[in-house]
């Protein structure tokens, strides 16, 4: 064992010595802050103009064709967000990888929305709402917290729970979505989701998260599943394998929007609650283009929390808007919050 440690230490020291004595000094320059659909460039140079045999460039881990020591590409091919740009330099008997980054902002300002309440329905004050979906005339809801997480089927007009199943106490339930008569339910930090039969609520399987660390919101467009993890990223999953295929990043024209929580697909766009937004705005929905991550709209629903406070005293800072459901047949949008005693049907209005 001591001999092995000695050899490893010797090789490590030799590598460090070789690296320190490498006369090549590379610099990778990139366009920094850009806007969507703008051309981006990256150029690799050697400080003393020493000869380089060849260079391979990569953007977001994908090889990009180069011309000499530089590349040019359109940011529309990536979408908004921050991405790693790498250059792999080949020079006499050596190779070296140099990294940098680019950040792509939206090229439009988001539309600002206010709202109008068109109906109000009862909602369980004890429900720590994590997921909400409207399907065949009923609301389907998942709630969170260890030992209290449940999946339920609820009558819209009365708020009556007509079916319910409890999650194992060791899991903290999060968002859910319905695809092909199956309910897919996320957990928070266990990196695991569960599959239930829509009719019987019987658990039929489970799946794990491939890349993301946490489960927050869940939605679908019948082709893909969309999953938030509390950051500015939304992961796109294959509905058959549940594997995370890729992610998009939610950005507007000034930067990223993080803390994305409960999700819903409405007319081809992702509607996302933002978790505990800065005071005084505690109820916010952002509207995201799933093709490129651009935040196309922002809805300030803070007045709904004030509406709740008229008849109910909220006990904690986390009792905020969280829950978006959409009735495709009528175009109705329903929203509620954690431990809110009301569920609102609203209409979004452009300001």
Image (cartoon, helix red, strand yellow):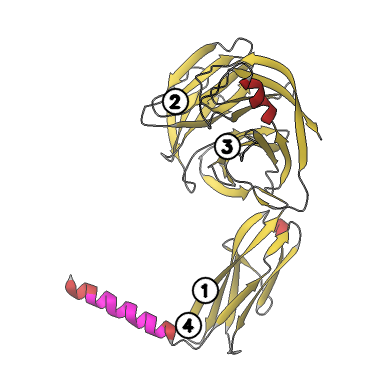
User: Residue 72: x percent and y percent?
Assistant: 71, 69
Q: Residues within 10 Å of mark 4 (few under 14, many from 20)?
A: few
**In terms of sequence position, does the residue under pointer 3 or pointer 2 come before the other?**
2
State the separation of the CA atoms marked 1 and 3. Answer: 40 Å
| Of marks 1 and 3, the one in the foreground | 3
Helix, strand or loop at label 1? It is strand
Image quadrant in which you'd find residue 268: top right
Which quadrant: the C terminus? top right
Helix, strand or loop at label 3? It is loop
| Of marks 3 and 2, the one in the foreground | 3
| Of marks 2 and 1, the one in the foreground | 2
Q: Which residue is mark 1?
A: 97
Task: Confirm whether the magenta stretch covers residue 16.
Answer: yes
Q: Which residue is mark 4?
A: 94
Q: Which residue is mark 3?
A: 276
Q: Which residue is mark 2?
A: 149
**In terms of sequence position, does the residue under pointer 4 or pointer 3 come before the other?**
4
Q: Is residue 284 left or right of residue 184?
A: right
The segment highlighted magenta reads 6-18
**In terms of sequence position, does the residue under pointer 4 or pointer 2 come before the other?**
4
Is the Cβ of the residue at disc 4 closer than 8 Å to that at disc 3? Answer: no
State the separation of the CA atoms marked 4 and 2. Answer: 56 Å
């Amino acid at each position: 064992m001591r001999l092995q440690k000695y050899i490893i230490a010797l090789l490590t020291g030799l590598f460090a010595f070789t690296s320190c004595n490498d006369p090549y000094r590379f610099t990778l320059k990139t366009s920094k802050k850009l806007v969507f659909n703008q051309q981006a460039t990256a150029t690799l140079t050697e400080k003393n103009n020493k000869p380089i045999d060849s260079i391979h460039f990569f953007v977001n881990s994908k090889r990009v064709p180069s011309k000499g020591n530089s590349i040019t590409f359109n940011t529309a091919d990536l979408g908004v967000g921050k991405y790693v740009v790498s250059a792999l330099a080949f020079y006499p008997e050596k190779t070296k990888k140099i990294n940098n980054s680019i950040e792509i902002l939206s090229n439009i300002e988001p539309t600002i929305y206010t709202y109008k309440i068109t109906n109000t329905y009862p909602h369980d004050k004890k429900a720590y709402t994590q997921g909400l979906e409207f399907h065949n005339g009923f609301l389907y809801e998942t709630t969170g917290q260890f030992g209290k997480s449940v999946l339920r089927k609820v009558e819209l007009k009365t708020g009556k729970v007509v079916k319910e199943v409890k999650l194992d106490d060791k899991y903290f339930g999060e968002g859910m979505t319905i695809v092909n008569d199956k309910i897919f339910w996320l957990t928070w930090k266990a990196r695991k989701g569960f599959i239930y039969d829509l009719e019987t609520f019987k658990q039929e399987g489970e799946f794990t998260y491939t890349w993301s660390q946490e489960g927050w919101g869940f939605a679908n467009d019948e082709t893909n599943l969309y999953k938030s993890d509390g950051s500015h990223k939304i992961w796109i999953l294959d509905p058959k394998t549940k594997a995370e295929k890729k992610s998009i990043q939610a950005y507007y024209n000034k930067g990223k929007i993080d803390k994305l929580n409960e999700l819903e697909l409405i007319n081809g766009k992702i509607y996302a609650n933002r978790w505990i937004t800065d005071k005084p705005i505690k109820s916010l929905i952002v509207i995201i283009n799933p093709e490129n991550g651009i935040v196309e709209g922002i809805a300030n629903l803070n007045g709904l929390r004030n509406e709740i406070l008229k008849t109910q005293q909220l006990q904690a800072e986390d009792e905020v808007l969280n829950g978006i459901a959409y009735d495709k047949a009528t175009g109705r949008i329903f929203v509620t919050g954690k431990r809110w005693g009301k569920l609102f049907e609203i209409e979004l209005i452009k300001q």
